[in-house]
Amino acid sequence: MHTPNSLYIQIAEQLKTDIATAKVLPGDRLPTVRELARKLKINPGTVARAYGELERDGIVQTRRGGGTYVVPRTNSKALDTMREDRLSTIFNRSILEGLGLGYSPEELEAIFTLQLTKWREERIRDNLKIEIQNKTTDRKSIVFLGSHDMAIEILATHLRQKHPSYTFSSEYVGSMEGLFALRQNKAHLCGIHLLDEDSGEYNTPYIKNILVGQPVVVINLACRLQGLLTTKKNPKDIRGIQDLVRNDVTIINRQRGSGTRMLLDYKLKESSIDPQHIRGYDQEVDTHLSVASSIASGTADVGLGIEAAAQALNLDFIPVAEERYDLVIPKDYYSSSRLRPLVEVITSEKFRMALSALRGYQ
């Protein structure tokens, strides 16, 4: 079975998230390579590669003949040292980037504390929200998880206007996380824009590989332009992907698992550019508007995003690629009374006209 090259990264990221949210605890034994490959219906080599990534990061430990385990908090001194060194490297890199942008040590300490607190609060809130929504019998609650697109916000607004008794909850977790959420029955629909490097096709290979045996309906919500966003009048004269390696250019990136991040990585590979040579590559945000906001505020010089985000914050836009943004809906939900009002809105002329008003959309 064909497997997208970056699927092992997404599996590793999903396991990291499970560990970070205490779904998998220190000392827990992970499924064997064959067990997880059978469950996901993918090549065992992909799972082995994902486990290898986690082991290199000091997150898991493979015991000969005994399986793969999440590294306990109080493991051997050598592993404790390795994990501490890894964490120190991550923080030192972030601190150096901050100092390089002119922030003081006091400002960096304050923002680290603030962001960590916000992360904890968001995780608690998101987990509680999903738990409540999965248990509720309210047939007028719709849960969306997936890639950010301004069309989703317009869709939610139109749904509220036409069917005020319905609630539409959206969380922008990235395309891959959205597909995994559908597989785990944590959402009623997701939004994706995933380029398969081997075939050059959008979305379909990933749907087939992750939602094996799960009947779904795919709705093309929009075709849109992705490009480089820069401040007005493009003062650093950024013309294309090749300029991202310049020493005077700092980028803002999207999170791993997002279709935009995968598109950027594909374009970098196409241009034979090593991401390690790009300033700000590890600086991540979760939405197109966050990319635009970072550039408008001067935190970064450039980032990959949709033209509508550039329009919203009065930024310049350099086209890079046209892509498909699709909604993926399990067939049972698509034909249910719960999602019927949403489908009515999607196919309405009023919604389509509102979407066409966004720059870069077709």
Image (spheres, rainbow, N blue to C red):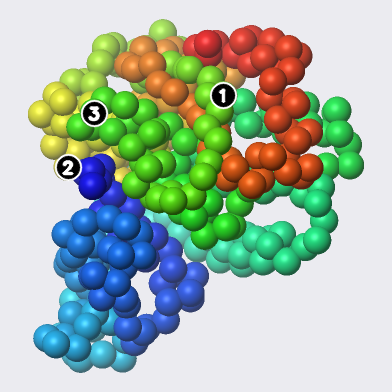
Residue 276 - label: 2
Helix, strand, or loop for circle 1? Answer: strand
CA separation in Å, label 2 and label 3: 26 Å
Q: Amino acid at mark 1?
A: Leu
The tag earlier along the polypeptide, 2 or 3, is: 3
Residue 179 image position (x, y, % from top left): 47, 47
Q: Residue at x 38, y 34 (%)?
A: 204
Q: Residues within 10 Å of mark 3 (few under 14, many from 20)?
A: few
Q: Amino acid at mark 3?
A: Ser
Q: Residue at x 68, y 62 (%)?
A: 134
Q: Is residue 54 left or right of residue 151?
A: left
The tag earlier along the polypeptide, 1 or 2, is: 1
CA separation in Å, label 3 and label 1: 21 Å
Q: Which residue is mark 3?
A: 199
Q: Amino acid at mark 2?
A: Gln
Q: Residue at x 74, y 25 (%)?
A: 345
CA separation in Å, label 1 and label 2: 34 Å
Q: Which residue is mark 1?
A: 221
Of 324 and 338, nearer the camera is: 338
Helix, strand, or loop for circle 3? Answer: loop
Q: Is residue 58 left or right of residue 353?
A: left
Residue 165 - label: none
Q: Residue at x 10, y 29 (%)?
A: 272
Helix, strand, or loop for circle 2? Answer: helix
Foreground tag (1 vs 2)? 1
Of 108 and 22, nearer the camera is: 22
Q: Is residue 90 left or right of residue 118?
A: left
- Quarter of the image for residue 16 reads bottom left
Residue 76 image position (x, y, % from top left): 20, 91
